[in-house]
Image (cartoon, rainbow, N blue to C red):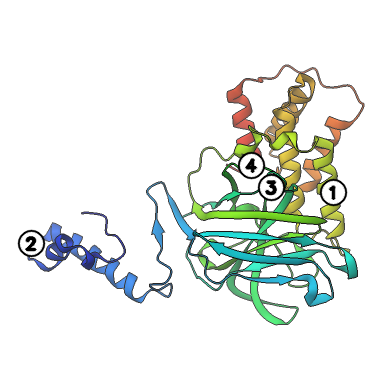
Amino acid sequence: CSRARRNPFHNPKLRNQIMAPSSSSSTRCRSLLLITLLVSLFSPVGKDAPVVLALDGSEVLAPPWRNWRVVNDNVMGGVSTSAVKISNDQLNFKGNISFDNNGGFASARMDDDARDLSDYQGLLVHYTTTQAADVKAINMQVYERFPQIGFGGFRPRSFSAAFVVVPTTELQTFYMPFDRFRGTNGFTRPDATSRFTPSQMLRMGLQVSFQLGEFDVTLQKIEAVSGIQDCIPPSIYATGCDDMTIAEYTTLAKDVLKKSNYGAGSLYPNAGAALMQYALACAVMSDDNNTSTQALTQLEEAQRANGDLNDNSVLESMLNSLTSDSPKATTEIDSSPAAKTKLLSKLFGC
């Protein structure tokens, strides 16, 4: 039967098909259409936030941007600043991170918008920034309906992954698989064992943590996706690797991990991981053949050993081997574009 859009009674032809008598086969189609109508009328999402189903296995989560609000480190005495501006169905999140008074983060959160995302494998963020923007790893936070005890009492359990923003005016995308989102214990300890449950998604948020200076990103769209084949950030092929050296990406990652460690490990390990993954991708795409070959070798060996390419210690070890003065491996390796694409796709989680 025909695909129904939002409310089938808005379409006279579909309305007549629903109401007219027909065979048992048509009855099944009418039943499906009626169910669609009832869901659209009585879903907790409601008329203000229609679920837009794309044809490529994705579900748009934003826009609409559902009343995002900022929460900065001034709640604990810090002086970091941020602001959210929504215009033309786009959300701009910009501000400045300061370490004064033991601060170091700025965040924005949306109103509750409960979804069952169990049919999807991750989030795809579409964004733009400015040519003058600094490189930043921005945490994408997702909250579950299950509560946990934390600062301020019981609150929704949160998990985060990160996407890397590089200076460019071109539209960019960044994929974050659900199995790479990591949580905390609600206070200042990471929880390495807990995993996000996509069927329990309650709301989303953004956070820039422990990266000194200004940030500026404009989100065009956030969608849940499945079956993604090419998740390599387009900026890798453009100017992203021109903004900082591999060593600079690695240093920034280590600084983020160190600053967010309150004694039990980094609260936001994926910010560091995303920066190191980006650095490795830049190494693979390097014009220097030795650097590219060494990076490909590291990735291939990690894949054969089933290494966790989202683990900071694994990533740091791989990067250290690229920047060390030790002799480089001479192993023959496939460095064709197809081979690079395959290994980089694995690195970024698809």
Circle number at residue 348: 4
Disc 4/disc 3 C-alpha distance (Å): 12 Å
Label 4 element class: loop
Question: Against 155, is 28 above or below?
Answer: above
Q: Nearer the viewer, residue 343 or 252?
A: 252
Disc 1/disc 2 C-alpha distance (Å): 66 Å
The mark that comes first in sequence, 4 or 3, is 3
Disc 1/disc 3 C-alpha distance (Å): 15 Å
The mark that comes first in sequence, 1 or 3, is 3
For this view, does 74 lie left or right of residue 284?
right
Q: Name the residue that disc number 3 marks.
A: 164
The mark that comes first in sequence, 4 or 1, is 1
Q: Is residue 118 visible?
A: no
Total number of numbered discs in the rendering: 4
Circle number at residue 254: 1
**Residue 323, x across and y down, in percent:** 87, 31
Circle number at residue 299: none
Question: Against 103, is 253 above or below?
Answer: above
Residue type highlighted by circle 1: Lys
Please rate how many residues cluster around mark 4, counting C-alpha atoms within 10 Å: few if below 14, some from 14 to 19, many from 20: many
Q: Nearer the viewer, residue 23 or 244?
A: 244
Please rate how many residues cluster around mark 1, counting C-alpha atoms within 10 Å: few if below 14, some from 14 to 19, many from 20: some
Query: In percent of the image, x 57 and y 60: which residue is there?
Result: 91
Q: Are marks 3 and 2 in contact (CB under 8 Å)?
A: no
